[in-house]
Image (cartoon, helix red, strand yellow):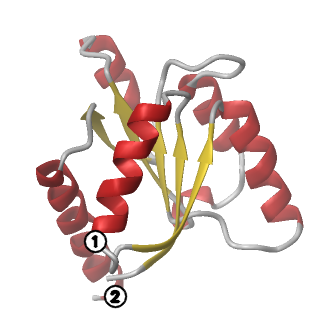
Amino acid sequence: MKIDTVCIIDDDPIFVYGTKVILNSNGKFCSTITVFENGQEALDDLEALLKSNQELPEVIFLDLNMPIMDGWDFLDEFCKIPDIESKTRVYILSSSIFSGDIEKSKEYSIVKDFISKPLTDIKFEHLLKEIENERIGRTS
């Protein structure tokens, strides 16, 4: 399985570094990793990609607590893009253990899962299987 682009939206450089290490350790997962420190920066860049007819990332790892624009505000704006669910899948990666955040994430059909930080090899393997199963379901 090969995904062209993965986007990490998170302001924690240590988390970003660790996630990139995990993603890069599986060279078959993705070709490109883009990183944004807040939702507004990501939204601006993703909207520019759309305007220039470029592909959006297939996977977005989204933190909830960030400056300028948090993960919830990003989701609210990102979901306004037409047909976005057929182009991108969002995984919330958060240190929040608040059950309200987990429940709220289920209100967004584009959010495929809520994963507690950090992203570990085991969680990543589970995520890979989930994406593969979803792809198989689309082609059946």
Q: Is residue 110 left or right of residue 133?
A: right
Compared with 114, 56 (above or below) is below
- From the viewer's side, name the closer residue of 132 and 120: 120
- For the residues labelled 2 and 1, the Cα–Cα distance comes to 24 Å
Specify few, some or many for label 2: CA neighbours under 10 Å numbering under 14, 14-19, or 20 or more.
few
Circle 2 — which element? helix
Compared with 87, 106 (above or below) is above
For the residues bearing labels 2 and 1, Cβ distance under 8 angstroms: no
Q: Earlier in the sequence, mark 2 or mark 1?
A: 1
Residue 63 picture location, percent across and down: 47, 30
* Residue reaching furthest to the bottom: 140
Q: Residue at x 27, y 11 (%)?
A: 98
Residue 1 picture location, percent across and down: 31, 82
Residue 110 picture location, percent across and down: 47, 48
- Residue bearing the label numbered 2: 139
Q: Amino acid at mark 1?
A: Asn
- From the viewer's side, name the closer residue of 101 and 3: 3
Q: Is residue 48 left or right of residue 126?
A: right
Instruction: Choose top left, top right, bottom left or bottom right for residue 89.
Output: bottom left
Q: Residue at x 31, y 17 (%)?
A: 96
The quadrant in which the C terminus is found is bottom left
Q: Residue at x 22, y 55 (%)?
A: 124
* Residue reaching furthest to the left: 122
Q: Is residue 56 left or right of residue 140?
A: right
Q: Which mark is residue 13?
A: none
- Residue bearing the label numbered 1: 26
Specify few, some or many for label 1: CA neighbours under 10 Å numbering under 14, 14-19, or 20 or more.
few
Closer mark to the observer between disc 2 and disc 1: 1
- From the viewer's side, name the closer residue of 89 and 57: 57
Compared with 71, 136 (above or below) is below
Circle 1 — which element? loop
